[in-house]
Image (spheres, rainbow, N blue to C red):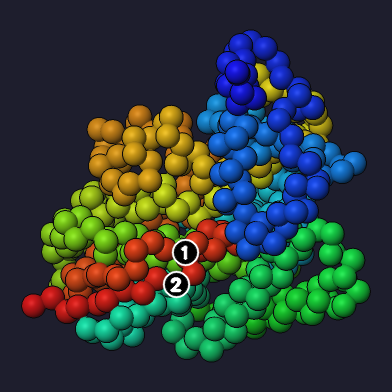
Amino acid sequence: MTTTKEKQNASLSNEVIKVKNLPTISPLAVFKNRKSILSNPLPFHRENFEKFGDIFRVKTGKGSPVVFTRDPKITRQVLQKQHKCYAKSPLQTVDLAKYIGQGILTANGEHWRTHRRMVQPAFHKKKLEGLINIMQTAIAKELDRIQANTTQNVFPLMGDLAFQVVATSLFSRSDIRKRMERLQQITEVNQQMLIKEMRQPYLKWWFHLSGEIKKHLKFSADGQAILNEIIEERIASGEEKDDLLDMLLAARYEDGTAMPRKQLLDEVLILFTAGHETTANALSFVLFLLAKHPEMQERVFEEAKTLPTTEKISLEHLGKLQFSKQCIEEAMRLYPPAYVIDRIALNDVETASYLFPKDTLVLMSVYELHRHQDFWSKPEAFNPERFNPENKKDNSDYYYPFGAGPRMCVGNNFAMYEMVLTITQILKKYKLSSALKEVEINPLISLKPKEVPLQFTLRE
């Protein structure tokens, strides 16, 4: 007997399949699984991908179609070849934006294009060269908090580290820790609230009525006030630091005017939120994976010994840490920070033999694509050799840790340099181990671990 999945996978490549003909999950099935979906939707995704194949529909009532996919052809076309036919969905442009503002992460159309052009030069490699040693100093200061020969949960440590790296790179200041800690608390509690709204849309009326949303919007205003105070202090000082804030303050529209303060605050808050969180998550996962693979850990250690100790570290130095980078790339395959990417069809559009009506919400599971057995050998295994330069080109159609196309993460190089610096500085000093067999994941806005207890043993 031919299954639905087999029929779907056997469809002729030139046959256009309509959304209404896709395998469908009913609203009742979603409601029955509401508690597990709220806690962790990934097993629900996996179950249905295994049952239906690489694409299925979720029926949510009378609203526009919702499609889940792990099809690499759809993902590539939506993000790259047909990117003008799709936009970020209201999940980001409305729900997320109300907490972190209308910046390059949450905006669409001309607003996004204009501000992307203004922000992007701050992340060019030549600019990042000047930030490497700011990063290094901030990382070293945070790593001093590690207690030798003890077991520590590395996730909050990496969260604080990544936050301080962004703070010092943006503001070139070390005297704003208390304000930054408050801002970090605000971003975390607001993220928890947003997840409730997204996964329990049937309770939105209660979130408004109870004052929960109003309370969290007040938190957002407090966060913006913190950033505004720091920006005012910079302007009043008259100092030029050549940091990210200076670059954003100097950015100009085509008519020569500067970015309005509200827009500047939105962009800075988004850099904090996205910049620290995804890096902290990825660092926690890669350190755990290295702790479980001592032979790979030693290869990173051998690379780390090549870094200079008496001179500034350059991009050229970091470029030689190839295996360290491969370990990070493989960790981000297994645990991609952006585990689902959302887009909405602007008009009726045919994509990879599927016809998506206008306003179809397309949810692309990067997590599932990165673990798809058709595209990866032993997909659940940690194997950094997948990203050896000789092998890497074979993975490009199935690997999206920073997204792809024009909306690819603007800070991807910043994040990679920070992560390479962090793992090499840790492994130069410590051997890592862990009694934990597997990390329990916590998919919120990004893919987080719950706890990552690691043993830090001083090297002799």
Residue at the (20%, 55%) spot, across then down: 296
Q: Is residue 437 above or below residue 353?
A: below
Residue at the (15%, 73%) spot, across then down: 310
Q: Which mark is on residue 331?
A: none
Closer-to-camera residue (312/10):
10
> Residue 432 vs residue 352: left or right?
left
Which residue is identified by label 1?
Answer: 440
Inspect this view and state whether residue 417 appears. no
Residue at the (19%, 74%) spot, across then down: 429
Tell me the quadrant of the picture where the C terminus can be found: bottom left
Label 2, label 1: how far apart the Cα atoms are: 7 Å
Residue type pointed to by label 2: Glu
The outermost residue toward the front is 1
Expressed as whole percent of the image width and height from the top left, the position of residue 306 reads 13, 60
Looking at the image, tell me whether mark 2 or mark 1 is earlier in sequence order: 1
Q: Is residue 190 above or below residue 285?
A: below
Closer-to-camera residue (329/256):
329
Residue at the (50%, 86%) spot, across then down: 177
Q: Which mark is on residue 451?
A: 2
Label 2: element kind: loop
Evaluate if marks 2 and 1 touch, with contact meaning CB atoms under 8 Å apart: yes
Expressed as whole percent of the image width and height from the top left, the position of residue 335 reads 45, 53
Residue type pointed to by label 1: Glu
Inspect this view and state whether residue 10 appears. yes
Expressed as whole percent of the image width and height from the top left, the position of residue 214 reads 83, 76
Label 1: element kind: loop
Q: Residues within 10 Å of mark 1 (few under 14, many from 20)?
A: few
> Residue 451 vs residue 184: left or right?
left
Tell me the quadrant of the picture where the N terminus can be found: top right
